[in-house]
Image (cartoon, helix red, strand yellow):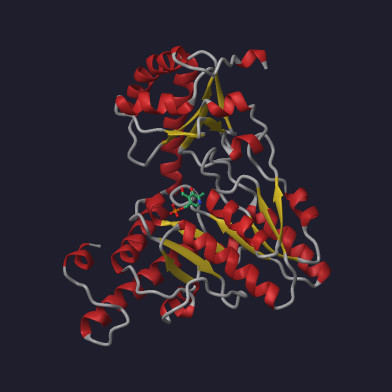
Amino acid sequence: MEPFLRGQFGNPSGLYSIGREAQAAVDDARARVAGCLGARPSEVLFTSGGTESINTALVGMAYAMRRAGSGNHVITTAIEHHAGIHTAQYLEELGFEVTYLGCDTSGRVSVPEFAAALRPETVLASIMLANNEVGTVQPIEGIAAAIRDYATRRQHRVLLHTDAVQAPGWLKLAVNDLNVDALSLSSHKFGGPKGSGVLYLRRATPFRQLLHGGGQEMQKRAGTENVAGIVGTAAAFEVANGGIAERTTRVRALRDRLRDGILARVPEVLVNGCQENCVPNNLNISFAGIESDVLVAGMDARGVACSSGSACSNSTWEPSHVLMAMGVHIRQAVGSIRFSLGEDTTAEEIDSVLDILPGEVAKAREGSLALAHYEAD
Ligand code: PLP
């Protein structure tokens, strides 16, 4: 990325030589990302991140399908990232009907339930690949097969988008195996720069662009390219796409060490989500009798960065929509914490968290208003 941040400031649209150099760097990055996805370079668009990719895919595909007279029904899930849920709600404002599928207690959507939601007016389905709060991996191939089966029987096309933001580095993302029409990525989730992302859009997919203006990105995403971000995206994606099996085994063992250590040291703890059919870098765990933000602050003060699954707004606790959809009790949901492991996380770091956590949980419980004891429920 450095040359494009330090002095190579050519605009890829410029016909002068530094513009052509920048364009060559963008073309090279596009070919490399396409190679990782098993796609054609012309099917790869660079965006400002996962949120833009998801908005562009959902609105652009649903709009184009409705305009072609194919229908106005969209299927998604209740456990998408807010980038997906809020875009689906926006589609409702635009007059689409949206079905939000539920999930089982592990956070997995059912393929038969999905198939039953398909109707003659359905134009688009958007189902995430791996959940950002509990890591559960969705049966995308099964969902794509249900769509194909429906399309053959009814002679009716339904487009499929997947939010794959949490997948790189852990799952192989071959778009033809996944059988999706569109797939969204966010660079900073796989070691690339923040504010950069990718939208894979299969050739000839009905689509109307979201950003209007210049002719960049094959007329599908207007605006001068973020050359440094694009170059960084391709380099990071290639690294993340290699060594997946070894990385997964190593990080899963660390995640298990963290989980088992917490279960052994802290009373009244519950693990949320399933631990097998999931990306291995995520541990979502609930502590009875705490509000998660208090524990997050305590851990932060000790140098540990973890996330809360709930948000406090206007003095009321908003439990995670994902945990609620999984049927987790609200008391358990407001006390949930997410630990995200990275490729560089070490066993020493896990052990240091295990040393710090019991004391911080005890402190958070002392000052807590949440009088929950899980047995009572
Ligand atoms: N989708 C998922 C599953 C995510 O985890 C995130 C970010 O955390 C996004 C979408 C949004 O990506 P970005 O913040 O790059 O816009």
The image quarter containing residue 226 is bottom left
The correct choice, above or below, for 33 with respect to 203 in the image is: above
Looking at the rendering, in which quadrant would you find the N terminus?
bottom left
Looking at the picture, tell me which residue is in the foreground, 19 or 40: 19
Residue 376 on image: x %, y %: 66, 13
Report the residue that reaches farthest toward the front.
314
The image quarter containing residue 13 is bottom left
Looking at the picture, tell me which residue is in the foreground, 287 or 2: 287
Q: Is residue 338 left or right of residue 347?
A: right
Residue 255 on image: x %, y %: 45, 31
x 59%, y 48%: residue: 80
Report the residue that reaches farthest toward the bottom.
15
Residue 247 visible in the shown view: yes
Residue 174 visible in the shown view: no
x 33%, y 56%: residue: 193
Q: Is residue 339 left or right of residue 16?
A: right
Residue 341 on image: x %, y %: 40, 37
x 60%, y 39%: residue: 321
Looking at the rendering, in which quadrant would you find the C terminus?
top right
The image quarter containing residue 64 is bottom right
x 73%, y 67%: residue: 72
The correct choice, above or below, for 348 with respect to 136 in the image is: above
